[in-house]
Amino acid sequence: MRRRDFIRALSAAGCVSLAGCRDSTQALPPGESLGASMNTGHRLQAGDMPSPTETEHVRVVIVGAGVAGLSAGWKLAKAGFNDFVIAELEAQPGGNSRAGQGAAGPFPLAAHYLPIPTQEAVAVRELLSELGVLIGDPRAEQPRYDERFLCAVPQERLYRHGRWEDGLVPAVGIGADERAQYKRFFGLMESFKRRCDQGRRAFALPMALSSRADDLVALDRQSLRNWLLAQGFDSPHLHWYVDYACRDDFGTRADAVSAWAGIHYFACRNGQARDASGDAVLTSPGGNAWLADGMARSIRERAGDRIRTGSLAFRVIETGDRMAVDVWSPTEQRVTRIEAEQLIWAAPLFLVPHVFAGNASLKAAAATFSYAPWLVANLTLARFPAERSGAGVAWDNVLFDSPGLGYVVSTHQQMRVRAGATVFTYYRALAEVDPAAGRALLLGTPHETWAEQVLAELEGPHPDIRQVAVRVDTFRLGHAMVRPTPGLIWGTERARFAGDFPRVRFAHADVSGFSLFEEAQYRGILAAERTLRRLGRDFVSSLA
């Protein structure tokens, strides 16, 4: 990207010039820029990887130890199968469900909650039962959950016009016409939630269980914004709320999100709990790391040390009746060829054109996927900062009409019993610019610029945020999540990756078209169960 285009993109994304973003009279707290191993990953594009010097043989190789790869390994291990390895580029497994650790305790690096699972999400409930968070029968209509993981109330609030409001839908000063549109919109979403076609819910979770009715599938061919306008929804505040929801779940604005995907966001969840409301979420100070760590621990206990971190899978070749995966260890400067009967590709699909030899049709299909770049900032605070008037502090704190989405409070579960230091985890999807420009911003913008911008944004609701901030770390995710653009969900390209190839299964959440824990876990377990069938192994399905 040329410098002129970079500065233009930076301005569009809401940041001032690189030189003038920081007030020289106010020192920034210490901190650093973290992120996925982009420099190592970018070597794939250069194509200058060394040749293998040794060969290893296993029956199954899994590439990627995010939620999908861990779920695949978890299922294989539960089935009593241990002849597999998981190759992971990063220093720790978990993908977008990893956590950091600081003076105020753990904090999320990306994904930070899991909604109460639906009855369709059988495998999620099975995992939660194994981890001791779901108590009793995981197939019960209203199971009980460990209250330590149920998000403490209040769960969410909105900062708007200088004060905090309860909930996330703008309420103060909204006229009768817009309120009527609110009511009609949520009524329509409720009707979608209740609709069933031949035993399938209109919008199920996992999405593969959804109805294929023609009128529903047709929703995928237009944007959510255009669908809203066609239904007569022109309320500016309703459009803001829907746009916020799309940025929050998809990293993309409503005018670039498939209407099917957008409605799925509002209509797919109908989970129930005996001791919590249906819209409750499960969380912990480290976000979703407890889920990833739980699966990794289960794999170790059942199958031994199968996860190899710091391992870049950079070449995949099908050789007769085997799959060959070349893996580079940057720390050891060594390349190992892993030959396996079966491959589960649980890494993002955008890597396929750079890694798979041949397979021109798969490469072309992968090239149609696009990815949202994100910035996450973790602010370690000596104490909770000063508050503006209105609704009291919540776990999820959203900023109206702001480039950022807001922040979650890492210590919200314990605030009633222990005051003191805390961490605000701030999220921002760079949705104001196209994804390539957003990735250029993440790479080219100094940590100090991002830290200053985050502090300036949070000074509105918390005027003394600079005085209480003792550290600000930024985390860059260039390809944080796949974007469910119009035509992707029910298009032929996505369907191609959902198939069961003779020696390869694709298992990332990308295969579903959007990044949710439930989707990644479903794809990983489905890939593992298909692999076990290919190997002639008996097992009890976690998806039935």
Image (cartoon, helix red, strand yellow):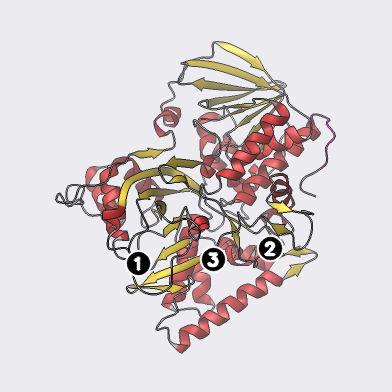
Considering the numbered disc 3 on the image, is that residue within a helix, a strand or a loop? loop
Residue 182, image x, y percentages: 52, 79
Dominant secondary structure of the residues highlighted in magenta in the image: loop
Image: magenta residue range? 535-540
Distance in Å between CA atoms under marks 2 and 1: 33 Å
- Mark 2 vs mark 1, foreground winner is 1
Between discs 2 and 1, the one toward the N terminus: 2
- Taking the spot 51% from the left edge, 67% from the top edge, the residue there is 154
Indicate the position of residue 284 as horizontal and vertical percent values. Answer: 55, 51
Residue at 45 percent across and 72 percent down: it is: 239
Q: Are the two marked residues, 2 and 3, in contact with CB atoms closer than 8 angstroms?
A: no
Q: Looking at the image, which is closer to me, 544 or 275?
A: 275
- Residue picked out by circle 1: 387
Q: Is residue 536 magenta?
A: yes
Relative to 461, residue 502 above or below? above
Query: Three-letter amino acid code at disc 1?
Result: Glu
Report the residue that reaches farthest toward the bottom. 176
The CA distance from mark 3 to mark 1 is: 18 Å
- Which of the pair 99/450 is nearer the observer? 99
All told, the count of numbered labels is 3
Which residue has dot 3 on it? 153
Q: Indicate left or right for 6 with 243 as reference.
A: left
Q: Which residue is mark 2?
A: 271
In magenta segment, residue 113: no
